[in-house]
Amino acid sequence: MDKLKLRLTLPDGSWLGPGKADLLQGIAETGSISAAGRRMGMSYKRAWGLVEALNRMFPSPLIETSRGGAGHGGATLTALGQKALALYRALQGKAVAAGADEIGQLLAMARQFDMSERK
Amino acid sequence: MDKLKLRLTLPDGSWLGPGKADLLQGIAETGSISAAGRRMGMSYKRAWGLVEALNRMFPSPLIETSRGGAGHGGATLTALGQKALALYRALQGKAVAAGADEIGQLLAMARQFDMSERK
DNA sequence: CTCCGTTATGTTCGCACGGGTATAATGACC
DNA sequence: GGTCATTATACCCGTGCGAACATAACGGAG
């Protein structure tokens, strides 16, 4: 599923794509950068790099982090982060819906694949 | 322009994105793999690799090549190639149109960029 | 039979990217 | 003051990708 991947390039050259969006969602759901990274099978280092990039591409950060304390630190989405994620998901949904016909045709004319790999 | 990039993943794991689509269009317009590659600022080798990938992802090739002869060789799109390109462009157009609102909102909330870079 | 621009293929090299690892630093709680 | 999971940062290293370069094959034109 989700055969169609979208990458939106911002004026400054940075971009928002499936990877950052998924990470954003993972942080929202797990409350932790490292947990979200683990869940996606990526190193903490890479996840943190993406967080840094995300926070730099908007005037104010999308992710708020805290260290130590009762919960041993963690990360949450700011209001801006939640909005950005929602907008990306909405964009994705509308794009897939609008292009369903073309997507179907392209998939239909693609090289036939063995049924054993169907899920 | 064309801030939104689409990548469609086919069942066999290969994918059709902006790079291959542009190359496809370049070949259609120039009638040559090397000319299309030069126009896009990529090495012939890379362009040819993409052509190979394109021809392998569908049951029959999208690009037909010829060597030597009066025109010193060249490449043209097959009917399938033209159709695939048209479908991708249509998909792109519909996706952008459908998500124009979300794209606009995301761009609007992005970090402000200096007007000197506007074109 | 040479010339020409293209397709087709191999080889080498530089470099960016991500993984792995290590190490601070944080701060509420016991 | 020690514990704990997390954030934050630095360093090394393998690997893959693409550029650059080199070379062959092609086949009609002249």
Image: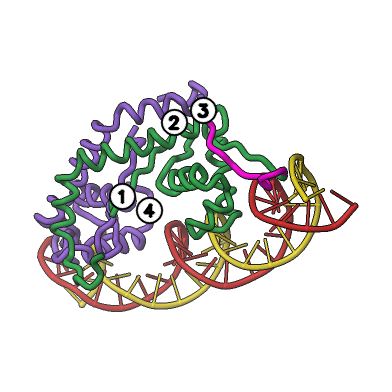
Chain colours: A green, B purple, C yellow, D red
Which of marks 3 and 1 precedes in the sequence? Answer: 1
Q: Are marks 3 and 4 on the same chain?
A: yes
Which of marks 4 and 1 precedes in the sequence? Answer: 1
Q: Are marks 3 and 4 in contact (CB under 8 Å)?
A: no
Q: Secondary structure at mark 2?
A: helix
Which of the 4 quarters of the picture holds residue B89? top left
The residue pinned by badge 2 equals A83
Spatial CA span between label 1 and label 3:
25 Å
Q: Which residues are magenta?
A: A69-78
Label of residue B26 in the image = none
Percent position (x, y) of residue B119? 40, 25
Q: Secondary structure at mark 3?
A: loop
Spatial CA span between label 3 and label 4:
31 Å
Percent position (x, y) of residue B110? 48, 28
- The chain letter under disc 3 is B
Which of the 4 quarters of the picture holds residue A17? top left
The residue pinned by badge 1 equals B7
Name the one closer to the observer, B27 or A43.
A43
- Which callout, 1 or 4, points to the residue nearer the camera? 1
Q: Secondary structure at mark 4?
A: loop
Disc 1: CA contacts within 10 A as few (<14), some (14-19) or many (>=20): some
- The chain letter under disc 4 is B
Q: Is residue B49 magenta?
A: no
Spatial CA span between label 2 and label 3:
15 Å
Q: Are marks 1 and 4 on the same chain?
A: yes
Which of the 4 quarters of the picture holds residue A69? top right
**Disc 2 residue type?**
Lys
**Disc 3 residue type?**
Arg
Q: Are marks 4 and 2 in contact (CB under 8 Å)?
A: no
**Disc 1 residue type?**
Arg
